[in-house]
């Protein structure tokens, strides 16, 4: 659980900004999004493989090499 304590002379905007940074850094949001729906292991492997292929293709075309 992410907790932030109000510092002396700190505005609520600054407190909220610090809280958001902590949430992003801790990875809570990505975990919640990932666990929102159940995905079987085989489906997860398929999605990860697809992501890897896209990433590799993007790297190859970005360097001037045509795939």
Image: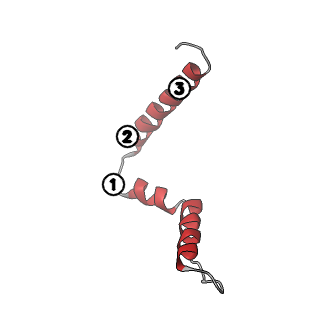
Q: Residue at x 59, y 78 (%)?
A: 4
Q: Residue 45: which disc?
A: none
Q: Considering the numbered disc 3 on the image, is that residue within a helix, a strand or a loop? A: helix
**Mark-to-mark CA distance, 1 and 2:** 12 Å
Q: Residue at x 53, y 73 (%)?
A: 16
**Mark-to-mark CA distance, 2 and 3:** 23 Å
Residue occupying the far left of the picture: 37
Pointer 3: what residue?
Answer: 58
Pointer 1: what residue?
Answer: 37
Q: Considering the numbered disc 1 on the image, is that residue within a helix, a strand or a loop? A: loop
- Asked whether 26 or 61 is in front, the reply is 61
Sequence order check, earlier mark of 3 and 1? 1
- Say whether residue 31 is left or right of residue 43: right
Q: Residue 43: which disc?
A: 2
Residue 28 coordinates in the image, percent (x, y): 50, 63
Residue 25 coordinates in the image, percent (x, y): 59, 60
Q: Does residue 2 appear in the picture of this structure? A: no
- Asked whether 56 or 8 is in front, the reply is 8
44 over 5 or under it: above or below: above
Sequence order check, earlier mark of 1 and 2? 1
- Say whether residue 53 is left or right of residue 42: right
Neighbourhood count class around disc 1 (C-alpha, 10 Å): few under 14, some 14–19, many 20 upward: few
Residue 55 coordinates in the image, percent (x, y): 53, 30
CB of mark 1 within 8 Å of CB of mark 2? no
Q: Residue at x 57, y 77 (%)?
A: 3
Between marks 3 and 1 in the image, the one whose residue lies nearer the viewer:
3
Residue occupying the far top of the picture: 66
Q: Residue at x 53, y 66 (%)?
A: 20
Q: Does residue 5 appear in the picture of this structure? A: yes
**Mark-to-mark CA distance, 3 and 1:** 28 Å
């Amino acid at each position: 659980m992410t907790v932030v304590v109000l510092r002396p002379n700190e505005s609520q905007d600054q407190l909220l900004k610090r809280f958001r940074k902590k949430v992003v850094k801790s990875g809570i949001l990505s975990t919640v999004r990932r666990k929102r729906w159940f995905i079987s292991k085989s489906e997860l492997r398929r999605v990860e493989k697809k992501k890897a292929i896209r990433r590799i293709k993007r790297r190859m075309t970005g360097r001037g090499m045509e795939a």
